[in-house]
Structures are given as C-alpha cells and as structure tokens.
Image: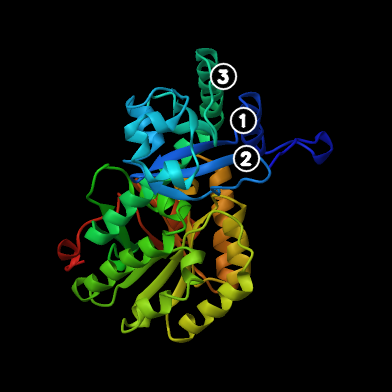
Amino acid sequence: MSHRLRPQDGVPSLNEIIHSAVNLARICLNMDVAFITEFKDGRRIFRHIATVEEFVPIKAGDSHPLEESYCQYVVDGQIPPIVDDSHIYPILQALSATEAMKIRAHLGVPIRLSDGSVFGTFCCYSRSPASHLREVDVEAMARFADLIACMLEQRVLAERAHETASARLSALIAARGMHMVYQPIVDIATRRAVGLEALARFRPEPLRGPDKWFAEAHALARGAELELLAIEHALADLARLAPGAYLALNVSPHTILSGKLEAALAGAPPERLVLEMTEHAPIEEYDSLARVLARLRAAGLKLAIDDAGSGYASFRHILQLCPDIIKLDQSLIRDIDLDPGRRALALALITFAGETGSTIVAEGVETERELAVLRSLGVDLAQGYLLGRPAPAPALAGC
C-alpha cells in the first residue's frame, strides 16, 4: 500500500505527510506493517497505516482495548522496544493480537506530546522473526515519533480542547446551571420600566461571563441548545415580572431557524415578548429567517435588532427584517454628550426609525448627561446602569 507524494498534486496534506513518514519507516526497516495509534478512552485507535501491498490486517479507524496490547506494553516498558520474535515472550504469546495480526517481529516507541502526555505509539512489525533490528533503529523510530508528535500536536490539542468544552457545556445544560436576571428598559420621561431584558448568569466553574459561555456553545454548534434553555428559564419568570412590561429574549438567527423556537415560546403571551436578535455577522438566509419571524410577529410578538451602530451587519439586519425596535449599541451611547460623531450617527438612526415606524431603545446609558442628550434627540426608551441594574425577578416585581 505504497504512497508517494507527487509535487504536481499541489501541497500535500498533513495526513499525506504523516502517511509517507510511516511508510518510509516501514520500508527502511524492512517490515510488513507500520502504524500510528492514538490512545483514547481506554482503547488504541489505528490512525495511520502502511503495509506491503498484499497484506492488510488492520484499517485506519479500527480500535482494540488498550490494556492488553503491544502498544500499552511498549509504553509501560513491559516489553523492550525491539521484539525479534514474539513467540519467545510468554506475555506476547498470550495476546490475541499476536495471532490475529500475524505479529512475529515488532518495534515500537511511544509518541509523546510536548507536555509529556502520551498520544499513542509508532510501531512496525513483520510476519517473520527478525534479527536485523538494532538500537539505532529504535533511535530512528523515536526521531520519527518526535517529528510526528510535532505535526499532530496542534490538531490533537484543538481536539482535546473541543472535547473538554463540549463536556463542560453538557454538564452545564444537564445541571441547568444558569439563572436569569432582568434589566429594565425605561421610559425616559417617567423613569418607569416598560420592558425587561432577560440576561443569563452562570454558576458553574470556570466563573466567566455569559458572552464566553454563549460563544463557546455556538463554536460547538450547540448555541441554540443553550439559548433555548435561557429562554425556558426566562419564560418561567414571566408571571413574576412587572405586569404589562414586555420581556426581551436574546436569540440568534441560528436558533430562530432551528425549528425549535416556536415550540419553546408556545403558551407564552406573544404580545409580551420581544425577540432581540443578537448577531454580529452577515446572514445569508434572510428569506427563511423572515418567514419564521413573520409567523411569530403575526401572533403579536415583536422583533428588536440589537447593537445597532456597532457594525455593518446590524444595519443590514435592520434593512432586511424591518424590526419593531432598534437598540442603539452602548458603544454609540458612551460619551454621546461629548462626541458630535456619535450624536450624528445616533440622530441618523433615530430619524430612520421614525420614517420606518420602529422604536428606538438606547443601551448602556450610565450618566445623566448621556440621558439628557438622548432625550433632546427624541429617544423615548433607554436602559443602562443609570436606570437600573440587572436583578432577579422578585426584586423587579414592583417596577
């Protein structure tokens, strides 16, 4: 099963390079089979295999229990790196792999990553005893193993990080390890709450902000799962929130398109709900998104576009989806009393909202001077620490 890299095929992939290294070792050592294994979940998984043409005892992806294998014995030092003849080692004669894979001569070394952890092994064997193997061959295999470890490390660490993050998220969701707080959206003239934005807070370790939890969930393609859990928590609090105030739920386009949002909202009074669409990247499925939103909006639910003024994507969302509410991003509100550029952009969005029938909500208001400028520009609704910090539902019942 030879493999040659051909320059005319373009730049070889990492897998091709590793396969060529494995096959080169097999040829140089005059062995029938060479392979790389990965140790994972108590098993050895064959990742890269090179064999003589007529002999294919194993395939990439095959796996066997690790505890009784040549690979584990090599790493533990129970057998020497060089086995001239497996039949003279009782421990190897007892292994089913010896007969099943036709192993007589064997040479193997661990593959260790830079942190000292064992990735797996680099091994080769033949179907006949071999007396030609020397310590220099072990050294050559060890050098190959170090080179392969360098090539694999970045991918392996990324896979391990992905697995760790996935397990962490699964544990969070299984434990329902979040609670909701609610920040008032206030009528500037009366200082009374007309709405409340639901914000998730997370209890488990590691302690970190909700933006990191949601970003990680989306990176794992599980963002909808986490968002729907937050929505479920928020809807459970709806009866305890200020009567008449709407509840704003943060939701990404992916979750809207998941087919699960409508079921999650079933039974809640749509006239009290606002979906705040949180997406900072361009969307390619506006038609599909608009169809789902149209059904929800026809029932009385309203749509808000979050973070307007923070980038091109939010402007495109506004034009494509014609929201009921446009939320001015806090980066636009910060120091608006001191910055003519911010005032000009805010005024343009306020004018646009007036022309299209949308309501403006200013986010991140922290000073009376910022609030005064917003009032002078015609903004009626705002939220921010000046007007109310996020708090649990019972603390807001009297808003």
- Asked which secondary structure carries label 1, the reply is helix
The circle on residue 132 is: 3
Quadrant where the C terminus is found in the figure: bottom left
Residue 388 appears anywhere in the view: no
Mark toward the start of the polypeptide (1 vs 2)? 1
| Picture quadrant of residue 354 | bottom right
Q: Residues within 10 Å of mark 2 (few under 14, many from 20)?
A: many
Residue assigned mark 1: 26
Toward the viewer: 101 or 1? 101
| Picture quadrant of residue 31 | top right
- Asked which secondary structure carries label 3, the reply is loop
Residue sitting at x 42%, y 79%: 262
Quadrant where the N terminus is found in the figure: top right
Left or right relative to 70: residue 267: left
Left or right relative to 326: residue 388: left
**In contact (CB < 8 Å): disc 2 and disc 3:** no
Mark-to-mark CA distance, 2 and 3: 19 Å
Extreme residue toward the top, this view: 136
Residue assigned mark 2: 51
Q: Nearer the viewer, mark 2 or mark 3?
A: 3
Toward the viewer: 143 or 77? 77
Q: Residue flagged by tag 1: what amino acid is it?
A: Arg
Q: Residues within 10 Å of mark 3 (few under 14, many from 20)?
A: few
Residue sitting at x 53%, y 21%: 131
**242 relative to 250, above or below:** below
